[in-house]
Every structure is written in C-alpha cells, then in structure tokens.
Amino acid sequence: MSELGLPIARPIADKALVRGLGLAASLALVLAAPFLASEYWINAIIVPFLILSLAGLGLNLLTGYAGQLSLGAGAFMMVGAYATFSLQLRVPDLPLPLALIVSGLIAAAVGVGFGIPSTRIKGFYLIVSTLAAQFFFEWLFLKFPWFYDGNSSATIALPRGLEVFGLDANAPHGRYYLTLATVALVTLLSFNLVRSQTGRNWMAIRDMDTAAAVIGVPVTRAKLQAFAVSSFILGIAGALWAFAYLGSASVQSFGLSRSYQILFIIIIGGLGTIRGAYLGAAFVSLLPLALDWLFQHLFSGHVDAGLLQNIQKGIFGLLIMWFLIKEPEGLARLLGIKLQARRRLFPSSQT
C-alpha cells in the first residue's frame, strides 16, 4: 500500500509480465513444434486439429453468432478445395497463399447464393436449403471431369514443387506452417469481426431478427454477410483439409459426414464462442485416438478390428449425447464456469 492508502500497481505489472512471458513461450513452442514432435503427430494429429478448428470457426460465425442453421459446411469446404486445385493447375504462377484467398472468395460467393433463402426462411427449412448445396456439389464435381482434370480416380492433388514460406508445400513442415499461419490469421480476424458492428448485428439477429429489424439492423445484408464470411473460412479450411492433411482428396472427403462432424464440433465446443471451435475440434479429433489407444492396451489385438471400430463409434456417440445433456452450452461454457469458481476461491489471483 502507498502512503495514501492506495494499492500499488506492481502486482498488476507482474501479472502482465507473466502473461507476456507465457504468450512468448507458447508462441515459441508452436513454432518449434515440427522439430519437437514426430512426423506422425504433425501430420495425423496437429494439422487436422488445426484445420477442423478453422472449419468449426467458420460454421460457428454463421450458426453460433448469426443464428443461421446450416448443414452445408462440407459443400463449401469442397468448393474451396476444388477451386484451389483448379487455380494451381491452370494458373501455375499464382502463389499458394493467394490461391487460398481466391478460393475462399469463390466459396463466399457460392455461400451467398445458397444463403439467399435465409432472407425468407429459417430453422428446419433453412437446414434443408443448405443441405441441397451438399448434394448439388457432390453431383457437380463428379459429373464433369474438368473439375478433377480427367483423373481416372476422380481425385485432386496439388502439383509438385509448390513452395510456401520457402518450404515445400507437400512436405510436413511446409504443410504445418501454412496451416498454422492461416488458422492464426483467420482466428485473429474473426475475433475482431465478432466485436465489430457486424458481429453485433449478427448476434441481434440470432436473438430475435424481428426486433433487430425494428432497431435498424439491416437483417438481409447481415445474414448474407454471415454466409459469405462463413463460406470464405470453410472454403480455405476445405483446401487445407485436401492438400495440407490428406494430400489428395475426392468428393467423398467432403461428404455429409464431414458436415455433421463440423456441426458436432461447434455444438460440443460451444456455440457463439471463438474458443469453442478449438475445444470442440480437440474433443472430436483426440477422443477417438484416446479410445483407440485404450482398446489396444485392453484387448492387445485379440478382438476384431472392425468390431473395435464400431464399439469406439458407439462410445463416442454416447459420450456426445451425455455431454450435450450435461452441458448443452458446450465445453467453453463448462470451462468458463470452472474458471469463475476458481476466481471466487482465489480472489487474490485477479490482482
């Protein structure tokens, strides 16, 4: 305490210093991950987790913040992947990061087109409208060989020799840093967007679109903006899923099950939160691996692999249902409650 009886500012400065050091250490760890973790962890766990987080973020902006229900996430990811393939194949001088942005813009335009019905319908009927995009693009990209360059297996893959940040885009390090930079940048932009007037308009529409229109919110424009931004992010996520994770992809890589997976991510992680996309992606991507490890150690290969896979799916589904009943507002809400409880128990940690 000072002579005037006021608390000194040193604890606040110390807390800011600790946070800064923690952030710097986290950043250094993330950047050094390819040199610390095995190639399997980078390719099979970390990269898909980041991409699923990005896709969940895109859908969460539309459903969690703007309140527009959608089952077309896989379709918009598909558009982004095929657009990136076409750009790299037919415009070889276009840098890959720029191709991702252009592909995202193409997906955004498609999203606006399929988002037009949201100006007249909502709820279950809007879900059906976005589901139509899923079936339409699966038919389109299989029907016309131009989209997959006439490949006999109807798959797409990036040409060899592409570089990103001076690294081979087909090598593990190049894929990781491309994914990391993209996810970090899009997350930062989304964080600022939801706190802007656009984000406030989305939340007003989500809570009650009629009341939002009464207070002057441009409802039609805001809904289409939400579809455009969401589809833009999903398009980029789809391109990364195809080329930074799978290496090559087909229409089946973005089927209806992918749309359900992205929807589960935002429901489990928490609707209307940025961190919910990351928490949900961690749950969806890491839990099957944990179950696989557990079954391998419990049964040691004495049980048929197909049966084990079905058991894992059943347990995974039961856990999802239990979690939704126990905490319907998602992991973000659950962890937020625990953090508030900790602050009540240790109030001195806030100074």
Image (cartoon, rainbow, N blue to C red):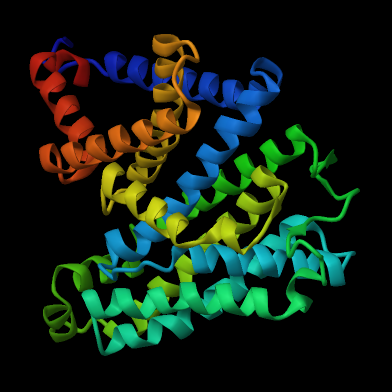
The answer to whether 282 is drawn above or below residue 40 in the figure is: below
Observer-nearest of 173 and 98: 173
Tell me the quarter of the image containing the C terminus: top left
Identify the residue shown where x is 76% and y is 61%: 153
Decide if residue 66 is on the left or right side of residue 59.
left
Tell me the quarter of the image containing the N terminus: top left
Identify the residue shown where x is 27% and y is 71%: 201
Observer-nearest of 292 and 280: 292
The answer to which quarter of the image holds residue 336 is top left
Residue 243 appears in view: yes
Identify the residue shown where x is 35% and y is 41%: 280
Q: At which x and y percent is residue 191?
A: 40, 51
The answer to whether 111 is drawn above or below residue 242 in the figure is: below
Q: At which x and y percent is residue 152?
A: 81, 65
Identify the residue shown where x is 36% and y is 84%: 221
Residue 351 appears in view: no
Q: At which x and y percent is residue 296?
A: 46, 15
Q: At which x and y percent is residue 125?
A: 25, 80
The answer to whether 44 is drawn above or below residue 317 in the figure is: above
Observer-nearest of 249 and 67: 249
Decide if residue 28 is on the left or right side of residue 84.
left
Q: Residue furthest bottom?
A: 120
The answer to which quarter of the image holds residue 72 is bottom left
